[in-house]
Image: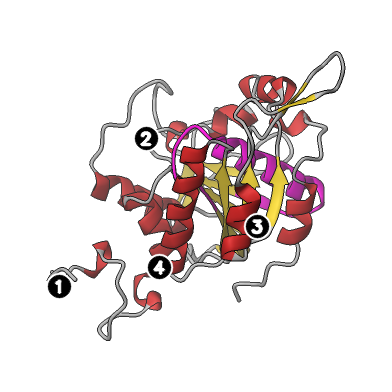
Amino acid sequence: MSECTHNCSSCSHSCSTKSKQDFLEPINAKSSIKHVIGVVSGKGGVGKSMVTSTLATLMQRAGYKVGILDADITGPSIPKAFGVNADVEGDDDGMIPPQSSTGIKIMSVNLLLPDVTAPVVWRGPVIAGTVKQFWSGTVWGDLDYLFVDCPPGTGDVPLTVFQSIPLDGIVIVSSPQELVSMIVEKAANMAKMMDVDVIGLVENMSYVKCPDCDKIIKIFGESHIEQIAEKYGYPLLAKMPIDPTLASLVDAGRIEDMRVDYLENAVEVLKTVKNIK
C-alpha cells in the first residue's frame, strides 16, 4: 500500500480517519430528490449517454419527475439528445435547469457555454468542482429520479460522483467486445471499492436486426455480458441493439419521441430502488 498523503479527496481506501459521509456534498436547499442513479461505463463509445437519455425518457413517460445531471463535462451530449439549448438562468437559490419538451430537467456545461462546440479545456479539480456545483448549486426542485451521466473510465469525475453525491446505485453500460468486457469488470471493481451498489448491467450495440429478413446479426461477435453478470451477481437489465432510428432521433434532439422498449425491464427494476431518505 502506498504511503498516506492525507488527501482523502483523491483516495479510494477506507481508513479510520474518514467515512463515506465525510465527502457528501449537501443538496441544494430548494431541492428534494428521492432517487439518484449513476450511469457509468469503463470506456467511451459504448452508448452511455444513449442509455441515460432512454432511461430518463421512459421514467418520465411512466409518470415520474425526472432530471439529468450531465457529469461528462468535457464531452457533454445530453442537451443535444433532448434538443435543449436554452440558457441556464439563476436566482439567489441557485441555477435553474432548463427543461426538455416533456419536462425533464437538465443541467450540463453545454448549456453554460456561449458556443456548444467550444472545448472545455480544464484540469481535473476544476471539472470535479463543476460536477459538485451542478449537484449542490442547481435548484432541482422535487424529483423522483435524477440520473447522473458520468464520463467514461474510473478517474477524477466518476470518483467525485461516487464520493460527493448520495447515489442509490449505478447502471454499468457495456458493448459486446472482449476488450469492453474487461473494462466492465474495472467499473464493477471500482463500485465495490467505493461501496456503491450496482443496480445492473446494460449491453448496448448487442446486435443489429436485418431490416429485410429480421435476422439477428452480432456485429461484434458473441456477448460475454451474461458471464460477467453471473460472476458479480448483477442483474442483466437489457441487451440493446444498434438501432439507426433511435440514433437519428438523438441526432435530431428528439429522443423523447422514441417508441422502443429495449429498457423496459430496467425501468421496472429502477421502480424498486430504495429511497435515499
Give the foreground label among 2 and 4.
4
Disc 3 from disc 4: Cα separation: 25 Å
Secondary structure at badge 4 equals: helix
Ranked by sequence position, the earlier of labels 1 and 4 is: 1
* Range covered by the magenta-colored residues: 39-67
Give the residue at x 46% y 67%: 192
Query: How far across and how far down the image is residue 205, in percent?
Result: 64, 32
Give the foreground label among 3 and 1.
1
Kind of residue at badge 1: Cys
- Looking at the image, is 272 positioned above or below residue 39? below
Disc 2 from disc 4: Cα separation: 25 Å
Nearest to the observer: residue 258 or residue 126: 258
Q: Residue 145, can we see it? A: yes
Read off the residue under disc 4.
Answer: 193
| Residue 29 highlighted magenta (yes or no) | no
Read off the residue under disc 1.
Answer: 4
Kind of residue at badge 4: Met
Query: How far across and how far down the image is residue 39, in percent?
Result: 55, 50
Give the residue at x 27% y 86%: 16
Disc 3 from disc 2: Cα separation: 24 Å
Ranked by sequence position, the earlier of labels 3 and 2 is: 2
Q: Are marks 1 and 4 in contact (CB under 8 Å)?
A: no
Ranked by sequence position, the earlier of labels 1 and 2 is: 1
Q: Which label number is shown at residue 145?
A: 3
Give the residue at x 82% y 23%: 215
Q: Residue 70, can we see it? A: no
Residue 187, image quadrant: bottom left
